[in-house]
Image (cartoon, rainbow, N blue to C red):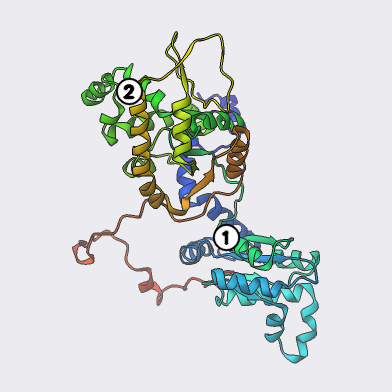
Amino acid sequence: MVDMSDFRGIMKRSLTIPLDFVPYMEKHKLYEFFYELVTQLLIQQPEDPIVFMKQCVQHAIRKRDIPRVILIAPPNFDKMTLAKILQDETGVCPVTLDDLRALASAKNACLYYDANEIAIRMKEILMSGVLHNSGWTLVDIPRNKKEARALQRVGVIPTHEVEADSRTMQQLGRDCAALTKIPKHYGAPSLFRIVLIGPPGSGYHSLAKDISERFNLICVNFNYILRQACLQETALDEMRRLCEQRCEQQLKPEIRIEIVKQFVLRSECLKTGWILTGYPKTVEDFKLLDMIPTPPNRVIILEVDIETCRERLLNRRHNTDESEHDFTSTDSFKIDLDYELNFHSENHRNVIEQNLREYKENIESILQYTRNTASVMDATGKRTLVRERLEACLMRPAPSVKSRIPEPLLTTEPMDIEFDPNDEPDPSIFDDIRVPEPKYSFI
């Protein structure tokens, strides 16, 4: 017998998206897509919502992420010049009140000062499809709150609002162009999954600890989790043998990514997000990291002069009693005088030079691979200033570009596909014997 009280308790629970589903939704922008779908569905209220949604999906496949911009500026600001700069940078087409008047007959021209008429004519332009490929920028409309609400009621909803300020016209235009490349955020669930890369001596370990505390993230130090893996039994003979040798350089890329993958897929990392240091070190590592179920969504590369890093590393001292390294440079942190500190041996100097050399050999190829998906940040100066720069970098929207991993090409030839008698036929063959579907237009 079913206990109805248990059923009622389940029904009262708030519905949440499972954390391991979030990376997939982020990658394919599903939350934004369904938000847009439901918005248009409720605004247009079609007679056949199922057909409308089917056609809306087809429309979204062809015209997704087209920018729709509204310029907000004082009356004396030259918004048309800004719109032209934006058009030159991105191809977005300006739309003015004069464009709406041009569609009207002389008899109805005066009505275009009415908010509802402006909205209707704007909707007609958009539903004609002439701006589906380029996107649009509203230059001198809406002029007031009434017109803005009228546009909203008919489904003319921007993806970006640009407000003029004290920047020069050219700078504002470039900034607007960069803004239109960033998809609008609809409040979709999102967690930081950060890769922090920098040369040895750049202070990335200390920065990662600060950022993990500031944003409540799990700090994932690859060297630490590698040592932890060395202490655990594993079914992979090769992994156990290499871990017992405590030699990271001998680990194959597939072993390194498996160690990282097992850690970042833990429940605490899925729940709060993470910041990873010490990995990836090569492009091959990065490609493998991008293919795990929860790939990084922010990549920060610290830019510090190699000579500065070398000086910091060589000036570091270690505790001779406990053999622990001071992970921070002597110019940024206090040293506990209760311990006796000595300089590192000549062997350690050789290790420093080798680590710096490996970083220089790999960083250029990593930059080429990450392209515009990575944020390169100046990490010189005091620790507090660098931390503030990193926090500001994370608070800004992530660069909006295509995935670093290309989609696999289809290798199946059409003639190689066998006919299945159970396949559904082309629905167009029924057009003569049933009522055809209504055709909807989209903004």
Q: CA distance from mark 2 to mark 1?
A: 48 Å
Residue 324 is tagged as none
Taking the spot 47% from the left edge, 23% from the top edge, the residue there is 316
- The correct choice, above or below, for 322 with respect to 415 in the image is above
- Relative image position of residue 356 (x, y in whole percent): 38, 36
Looking at the picture, tell me which residue is in the foreground, 155 or 315.
315
Residue furthest to the bottom:
106
Q: Of marks 2 and 1, which one's residue comes earlier in the chain?
A: 1
Q: Is residue 155 visible?
A: no
Task: Tell me how many marks there are.
Answer: 2
Position in image of residue 25 (x %, y %):
48, 46
Q: Secondary structure at mark 1?
A: helix
Q: Is residue 144 left or right of residue 265?
A: right
Q: Amino acid at mark 1?
A: Ala
Is mark 2 in CB contact (under 8 Å) with mark 1?
no
Nearest to viewer (mark 2 / mark 1) = 2
Image point 55% across, 53% down: which residue?
A: 32
Q: Residues within 10 Å of mark 2 (few under 14, many from 20)?
A: few
Give coordinates of residue 140: x percent, y percent. Answer: 73, 73
Q: Is residue 290 left or right of residue 335?
A: left
In the image, 239 versus 422, the foreground residue is 239
| Residue ID for mark 2 | 347
Q: Eyeballing the image, is 400 above or below 305?
A: below
Reading the image, the residue beneath label 1 is: 178
Q: Residues within 10 Å of mark 1 (few under 14, many from 20)?
A: some
Q: Quadrant of the C terminus?
A: bottom right
Q: Amino acid at mark 2?
A: Asn
Element class at badge 2: helix
